[in-house]
Image (cartoon, grey):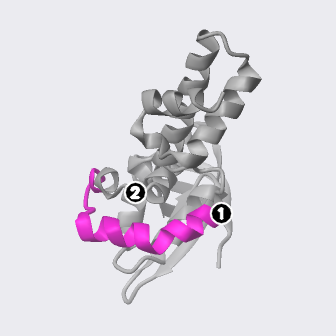
Amino acid sequence: MFDFIKGNLVHKAPTTAIIETNGIGYKIHIPLSTFEKISNSESAKLYTKLSIRDDELKIYGFVSLEERDLFNLLLSVNGVGPNMALTILSSSSITQFEKYVVSNDPKSLQRIKGIGKKTAERIILELKETIKCVSPDIKSSKDTEKMAIISDAVMAMVSLGYAKSEAEKAVNKASDNLDVTVGVEALIKEALSRV
């Protein structure tokens, strides 16, 4: 119904903001991340989501479209309501949350107040593929670890006197035949046998 509300910021608190526009004050429920980004100037613009429950209407507001998109995505998860979605947005950045989901890290999600083991696992199960499609640049922690090990192995070979291009070629060949997560030493040994 509303895409955004723009007007005078009458009051802000960590969980709500009141924006007055055309003589009407709208009470908008916000995450902590939005609270921190709203300036104390008179004018404010929040992207909104209207929630209609049996006995009440609530407006949720976000300083960016990305926050609102993640809020809507969280609401699609069975068992996650608006309050839990706001808590998630208040407790972690969008990038952090996406990394937790993509790297299959329920323990980090469980550190967020109100999220138990089953809910964390459900969030990962239901959102992992969507987040991978929407944010393909997010790498899992395992991918990051592999890249670090490969980089360390290349640098070690360069320090042994090999040209960087030669070291990269040998390490890449070695990483094709070896599980990189066994460690830098094993990867270097395998790479040296291919020089």
> Chief secondary structure of the magenta span?
helix
Kindly give the residue lying farthest to the right in the view shown.
165
Q: Amino acid at mark 1?
A: Val
Q: Nearer the viewer, residue 127 or 80?
A: 127
Asked if residue 60 can be seen in this view, the reply is yes
Q: Residue at x 53, y 34 (%)?
A: 190
Q: Give the mark, 2 or 1, whose residue is nearer the N terminus.
A: 2
Please provide the residue range marked out in magenta.
Answer: 110-134
Q: Residues within 10 Å of mark 1 (few under 14, many from 20)?
A: few
Reading the image, the residue beneath label 2 is 88
Q: Residue at x 58, y 70 (%)?
A: 130
Q: Quadrant of the C terminus?
A: top right
**Where does residue 47 sit, x and y in percent of width and height?**
63, 61
**Where does residue 54 sit, x and y in percent of width and height?**
38, 89
Q: Which type of secondary structure does the marked residue at label 1 adopt?
A: helix
Q: Residue at x 36, y 73 (%)?
A: 122
Marking on residue 134: 1
Asked if residue 23 can be seen in this view, the reply is no
